[in-house]
Amino acid sequence: MAVEMREDANASSRPPVNVTRLARNFGCEVVMVDFSPDTVSARIQRHTSAAHFDYLLEVNAFDFPQRQRFSIAHELSHAVLHDDPARDFEFIEDRKPLADYDKPDDMYKEVQANMLAAALLMPEQAVRREWARLDDIDDLADIFDTSRDSAYWRLNNLKLLVNG
């Protein structure tokens, strides 16, 4: 799905992917906000005021840039995967582990959004190419402008880590 989304938006698969432009191409107005208290990474909901956008995607202005990029990709993934026009649509990303979600369906949606976000930010073929060349997680994270943790999990999910 990530490949098709990048193609639909005429987005390059060359790292780093311009995730803000990608989100805008899918109808998201991306804004940086001060979430107080600082327990939220991002929030997405249907837009109620702007005629040009379908969604309002708010990102914590005080997060590190790599966290912001992942949050944008993650919230965009919720919009693409989980928006049901017949229901209210809002996802709030609290800073809590997946295991802390009360409902299995909520945890499943978070895992889905994480997987698609990782694929959007770190396209499989580009990851395979760069990993074969570099073989260093920190360098890979730098190339894709992601956190080390995101790069690690992407490599692990692609089964590219020998001891992963």
Image (tube, rainbow, N blue to C red):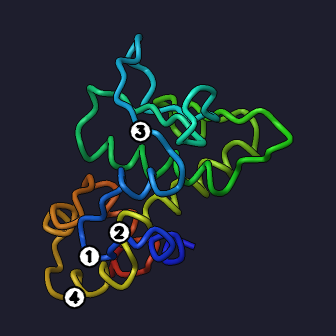
Residue at coordinates 41% horizontally, 11% vertically from top-left? 37
Which residue is depicted at the point 71% across and 36% down? 89
Q: Which image quadrant: the C terminus?
A: bottom left
Name which quarter of the figure residue 90 lies in.
Answer: top right
| Mark in front: 3 vs 1 | 3
Of labels 2 and 1, the one closer to you = 1
Return the residue at label 3.
30
Displayed quadrant of residue 135: bottom left
Residue 110 position within the rendered picture, expressed as x and y whole percent measured from the top left: 60, 48
Label located before the other in sequence (2 or 1):
1
In the image, taking residue 136 as reference, residue 152 lies left or right, namely right
Please give the residue where the numbered disc 2 appears in the rendered image: 122
For the residues carrying marks 2 and 3, which lies nearer the camera in this image?
3
The residue under label 4 is 132
Label 1 sits on residue: 14
Q: Rounded to the nearest whole Å, what is the CA distance between mark 2 and mark 3?
A: 20 Å
Looking at marks 2 and 4 on the same chain, the residue that comes earlier in the sequence is marked by 2
Is residue 85 found left or right of 101 in the rendered image?
right
How many angstroms separate mark 2 from mark 4 (CA)?
14 Å
Q: Is residue 44 above or below residue 78?
A: above
User: Which residue is depicted at the point 23% across and 81% down?
Assistant: 131
Q: How far apart are marks 2 and 1 (CA)?
A: 9 Å
